[in-house]
């Protein structure tokens, strides 16, 4: 039960990524940067506080203003002048399945 | 002053224009607190060739066009193309993030996936600073 447009988006992703590998599971993170303006960063013990510390370390004024809690992943999409970009933070030592799930839902 | 020094100065000036790769890579270096040697190490390139690399035109296309541009630069400087692409995406994300925070907070969407507290030890760091810039959805979408 999947709509045709999902297949079309998937086909376009793999075309832009340089072709779909024959075997599963496929490593999305390795190829996503070719097809999408997305950056992925690993952060140990990911949490709201860790995200804010990561932002502060990079002199960003952005802060997440929700109560601190542990996270499996955190992503944001920004649209600046002539630039659209996404960032995905995930914990280090994350399972491959968590990476894939986090990337798909970003 | 050597030619390399002159090129490095030119790259610093070029970093003010998004046309040049310097605008992305030097912003990344500043955010990551890297000097030229550190940036060259991240890129996997010879430090001597870094100024020339910074003065390349920044790939701006999507999909195959982006890939072709990155691969051309990587081939010219003997870099790993995938490594360069990942670093460029991170650099552009940092640049976009800075612009969003200071100019247009409304242009940001954030989401988070919660982790069960007993999945891994709860972070003991203090809560975030109270600055109402962005709030990820509670359900992670």
Image (cartoon, coloured by chain):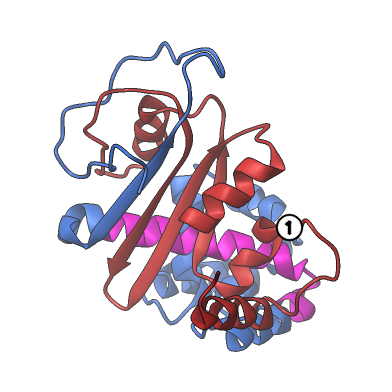
Chain colours: A red, B blue
Q: Is residue B1 in view? A: no
At 21% across and 33% down in the image, what residue appears? A65
User: Residue A36, image x and y in percent?
Assistant: 53, 71
> The residue marked by circle 1 belongs to what chain?
A
Most foreground residue, A62 or A31: A31
Toward which corner of the image does residue B15 lie, by quadrant? Answer: bottom left
Label 1 secondary element:
loop
Q: In the displayed structure, would residue B56 be above or below residue A90? A: below
Q: Is residue A47 in view? A: yes
Judge whether residue B24 is colored magenta.
no
At 41% across and 65% down in the image, what residue appears? A85
Q: Is residue B96 left or right of residue A9?
A: left
Toward which corner of the image does residue B81 lie, by quadrant? Answer: bottom right
Judge whether residue B87 is colored magenta.
yes
Magenta stretch bounds = B74-99
At 45% across and 49% down in the image, what residue appears? B30
Most foreground residue, B135 or B89: B135
* Residue identified by numbered label 1: A27
User: Residue B6, image x and y in percent?
Assistant: 55, 72
Most foreground residue, A94 or B41: A94
User: Residue B12, image x and y in percent?
Assistant: 45, 66
Q: In the displayed structure, would residue A35 be above or below residue B135? A: below
Count every numbered label the image shows and give the total. 1
Q: Quadrant of the N terminus of chain B?
A: bottom right
User: Residue A1, image x and y in percent?
Assistant: 55, 69
Looking at this view, name the residue that lies furthest to the front: A1
């Amino acid at each position: 039960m999947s709509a045709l447009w999902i297949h079309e988006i998937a086909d376009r992703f793999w075309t832009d990524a340089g072709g779909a590998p024959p075997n599963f599971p496929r490593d999305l993170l390795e190829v996503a940067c070719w097809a999408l303006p997305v950056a992925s960063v690993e952060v140990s013990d990911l949490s709201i506080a860790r995200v804010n510390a990561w932002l502060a370390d990079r002199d960003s004024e952005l802060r997440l203003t929700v109560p601190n809690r542990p996270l499996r992943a955190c992503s944001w999409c920004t649209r600046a002048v002539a630039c659209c970009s996404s960032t995905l933070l995930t914990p280090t030592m994350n399972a491959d399945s968590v990476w894939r799930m986090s990337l798909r839902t970003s | 002053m050597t030619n390399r020094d002159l090129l490095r100065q030119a790259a610093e000036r070029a970093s003010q224009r998004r046309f040049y790769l310097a605008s992305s890579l030097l912003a990344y270096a500043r955010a990551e607190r890297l000097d030229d040697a550190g940036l060259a190490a991240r890129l996997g390139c010879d430090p001597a060739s870094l100024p020339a690399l910074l003065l390349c035109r920044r790939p701006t296309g999507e999909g195959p066009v982006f890939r072709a541009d990155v691969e051309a630069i990587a081939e010219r400087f003997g870099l790993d193309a995938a490594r360069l692409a990942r670093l460029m995406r991170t650099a552009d994300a940092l640049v976009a993030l800075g612009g969003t925070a200071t100019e247009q907070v409304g242009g940001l969407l954030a989401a988070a996936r919660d982790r069960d507290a007993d999945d891994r030890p709860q972070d003991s760091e203090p809560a975030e600073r109270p600055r109402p810039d962005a709030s990820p959805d509670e359900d992670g979408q």
